[in-house]
Amino acid sequence: MPYNKKIFFLILMISISTSLAIFCKMDRKSNADLVKTEFSKDLSALQENINNQLLNAAKNKDENGIKKAFLQARLKYKEIEFYIEYFFPTTAGLLNGAPIDEIELGENLVKNPSGFQVMEELVYNVPNQENRSELLNEIKKMKLNLERVSRFNDEYEITDAQIFDAIRLEILRITSLGITGFDAPVALNSLPEAVAALGGIKKVLTVYDEEASGEKIDQSIHFIQRTSSFDEFDRIGFTTDYLQPLGSEIAKLRKRLNIPTAASGAALREGTVSLFETNAFDVDKFVGNSTMFISNEKISLGKSLFDEVMLSKNLDRSCQSCHHQSMAFTDGLVRPLGISKGKVLDRNTPTLSYAGLQRGFFYDLKAGSLEDQALDVIHQKEEMGGSLEQAAQRINTSGKYQKAMKNAYKDDSEATPWKIQHALAAYIRSLSPFSSRLDRYMRGDRSQLSTIEKTGYNLFMGKAKCGSCHFAPLFNGTQSPMFIKSEAEVLGVPAKADTAHAKIDSDLGRFGLYQYPQFKYAFKTPTLRNISKTAPYMHNGVYQTLEQVVDFYNRGGGAGIGISLDNQTLSGDQLKLNKSEIKSIVAFLTTLDDES
């Protein structure tokens, strides 16, 4: 072959090889794109179930077919829950939100619930024309919401970091919600659904590494599947021996692949893989802006102000007058005493423990921040009767606070009402030590809990359904794993501890602020941490012991003791806990006490 032809042929081959390499590279999808494609396929399978099997069964009034298709749809949803909750959180609320009205106070808007949890109540109710018509309507709404997900997903660009963050949060969601019956309280199908959620995670991880974490997921699934029933499931063992190690294993894989953490909207630190690990929470994520961030100097100043009588009108009260540290910052009274002689305030003194890790304050959630709470208490006529302006003037005449103010706020200005509010709030935000025996047990010290206490945890998170409102690990009404909203519930709390002739307590709760029927007798769900130190219980201090409280829930709340409320959010069904089970739950609750 002539020399020129050889050169031409060589150049041609190089050009073809280069073109093929570029084409193949362009054609090869990233791992994130592969996950997105798999999600689209799984979403289509869910849509097929909703659009055909469930809809047709409902139209044909095939009751067995309805239940079968509904349970299948739930499992398919759980496989992709991690993705929908992360990338479409608003739509996730429409697909699987709580079956109660959502009230937007700023917009004066009442949003009716929709999705699987609403369907579940309809599916498992005795069928009649009305609820089957409602079910058809819910199916049609779900069709539209799934179409919205499909349409927007096509436009999204997602990253590896986001995918691993979504998986991380799903593991935490299973820990706190997925194995409690939270979103399947009637069907009690939570355990098969947890299996489906883990299977969805495994499918994703296989894209990144075919063998990574697969064995641990398989072991987790096998542990669930060998359980005989929902009530008998060992939730604490599953969490410590399977879910937490799985979360750590996935975090190691992410690091090995050099995938960074993602800045999600959760109030957890970005690297948190266990709800019970030390410093799992970033307290600054519970506040509105950087001016409210915590610091050691602000905490120190706030602690001094917490004990300071200069905040009160008559120089005779401080915050600690009603919030004693030895009682987990409560006062041990049924209801606290006011300033005026013989005056008793309306509601039991709430604990300040873990108050910084919630989204609403006071029993009626009237304050949106701890700063607002401090303002209200100091100015409230019968609590401190003071004035922040006056308090600032007093503090500025005291040499004690000049240096502390400067250290806390890094300026030469004097005390102001805002600085007083914020310093107090910073101190209260520091009152979340996570030093209980349960915390130490969950971190690996298996000597911390007894058999009865572990049984109590399993009952609390399972049969007794306590964990469906008091969400782990805060055990308050701020839902894991995002921690973006604090809930209120209507329990039907009686005026007196009388189960024979029970009458509803006269306090209307949130309804006193906002006249929505749904808010009548609604009160914030408080934390149960340090609960053994904070008797008496409920907003009116009606119960003196934890045994009484558990008995109230065991009976079905107000509905179970003869109080009729159309808007009770607590299930009126009896829990059917025996004396031994109640004893176990109370024993578990004592493990939530912080220890120095």
Image (cartoon, rainbow, N blue to C red):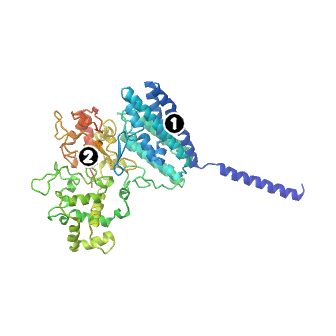
The total number of labels drawn is 2
Is residue 194 in view from this perspective? yes
Q: Residue at x 25, y 32 (%)?
A: 578
Q: Position of residue 241 (x, y in %)?
A: 41, 43
Q: What separation in Å lies between label 1 and label 2 (alpha carbons)?
A: 40 Å
Q: Position of residue 569 (x, y in %)?
A: 30, 39
| Quarter of the N terminus within the rendering | bottom right
Spot the residue most to the left.
341
380 vs 134, nearest the viewer: 134
Q: Position of residue 471 (x, y in %)?
A: 34, 45
Amino acid bearing label 2: Phe
Q: Residue at x 38, y 47 (%)?
A: 480
Which SS class for mark 2?
helix
Amino acid bearing label 1: Gln
Up/down of 82 relative to 353, above or below: above
| Quarter of the C terminus within the rendering | bottom left
Report if the CB atoms under discs 1 and 2 are less than 8 Å apart. Answer: no
Up/down of 232 relative to 23, above or below: above
Up/down of 371 relative to 58, above or below: below
Is residue 245 in view from this perspective? no
Q: Which labelled disc corresponds to residue 434?
A: none
Drawn side of residue 499 relative to residue 127, left or right:
left
Q: Find disc 2 in the rendering and name its residue.
A: 511
Up/down of 68 relative to 567, above or below: above
Q: Residue at x 37, y 61 (%)?
A: 289
Which SS class for mark 1?
helix
571 vs 207, nearest the viewer: 571
Q: Find disc 1 in the rendering and name its residue.
A: 47
Image quadrant assignment for residue 507: top left
Q: Earlier in the sequence, mark 1 or mark 2?
A: 1
Crowding around mark 2 (Cα neighbors within 10 Å: few <14, some 14 to 19, many 20+) is some
Crowding around mark 1 (Cα neighbors within 10 Å: few <14, some 14 to 19, many 20+) is many
